Amino acid sequence: MDSTSTFTGKTWFITGTSRGFGREWAAAALGRGDRVAATARDTSSLDDLVDTYGDAIMPIALDVNDRDADFAAVAAAHQHFGRLDVVVNNAGYGHFGFIEEITESEARAQLETNVFGALWVTQAALPFLREQGSGHIVQVSSIGGISAFPMVGIYHASKWALEGFSQALAQEVADFGIRVTLIEPGGFTTDWAGDSAARSQTHPAYDEMRAKTQQWRAQRNATPGDPVASAAAILEVVDAEEPPLRVFFGAAPLDIAKADYAGRLETWEQWNHVSLLAQG
């Protein structure tokens, strides 16, 4: 596609568009006239969007764990559309298992997708965004990126890592006109805890804790958010003149964050005498 065309909308690169948030956000962007490079492991899941939107969507088969493929996919999208305005790192999955239950291969697989996949795509996009002097990198984190709960510890580790490098990134690239936003959803009716999730082999020592945790999760997720509604929210974020570094999606995360951070501040204050003792 000729990069000198008169197209005035946004050009998106979105990973993990076969279902959930990625699918809804791609459809919303296309529906308002934007262009989308949409990645999925199996691009046949995008056939209906191609039928509807034609050349406005560029399906790309991609496993984000493959660093070389990530760089090639971003470069192909930029060459095809002539620019990139919004880069969304949405590909990821949840892993259920208590810390003692998680195997090395399970831990590495979780971090490969949720952390390194997002890192490689981010690195691949940055030279193009720097050159054009603009762009918005959107990282799909979680309320689990700032708080933590039993049975999803390695998932939390991946999202806390994503939060850390993205906050640093935001400071590093601001002078180039590039913005960074961490989307932090609560519970939504996506497939995050369904077939797309991974699960460790259970250890009987944790059976009682597992039952308590599952009951608590069921109560907390009694009124999950609607992924379709999230499309309007993501459009408002990417259209903002000064987008936020962090924004919750859903009704539950703010109260969780308030309680968690209040507890942290109280503990830090309570133990500040030890902090000063360590200072010397």
Image: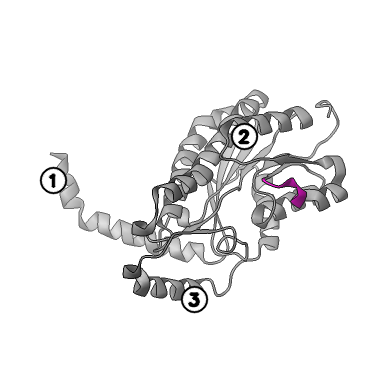
- Between discs 1 and 2, the one toward the N terminus: 2
Indicate the secondary structure of the residue bearing disc 2: helix
Quadrant where the C terminus is found in the figure: top left
Percent of width and height locating residue 28: 75, 53
Q: Which one is closest to the eye, mark 2 or mark 3?
A: 2
Classify mark 3: residues with Cα within 10 Å, few (<14), some (14-19) or many (20+). Answer: few
Image position of 146 (left or right of 276):
right
Indicate the secondary structure of the residue bearing disc 1: helix
**What amino acid is found at the position of numbered circle 3 in the picture?**
Gln
Q: Residue at x 54, y 62 (%)?
A: 186
- Residue beneath disc 1: 277
Rounded to the nearest angstrom, the CA distance separating label 1 from label 2 is: 48 Å
- SS assignment for the magenta stretch, majority: helix
The circle drawn on residue 219 is 3
Magenta segment: 41-45
Image position of 193 (left or right of 49):
left
- In the image, residue 233 sits, relative to residue 214, either above or below, namely above
Indicate the secondary structure of the residue bearing disc 3: helix
Magenta stretch encompasses residue 191: no
Percent of width and height locating residue 159: 47, 49
Q: Quadrant of residue 19?
A: bottom right
The circle drawn on residue 70 is 2
Rounded to the nearest angstrom, the CA distance separating label 2 from label 3 is: 38 Å
Q: Which one is closest to the eye, mark 3 or mark 1?
A: 3
**What amino acid is found at the position of numbered circle 1 in the picture?**
Leu
Classify mark 1: residues with Cα within 10 Å, few (<14), some (14-19) or many (20+). Answer: few
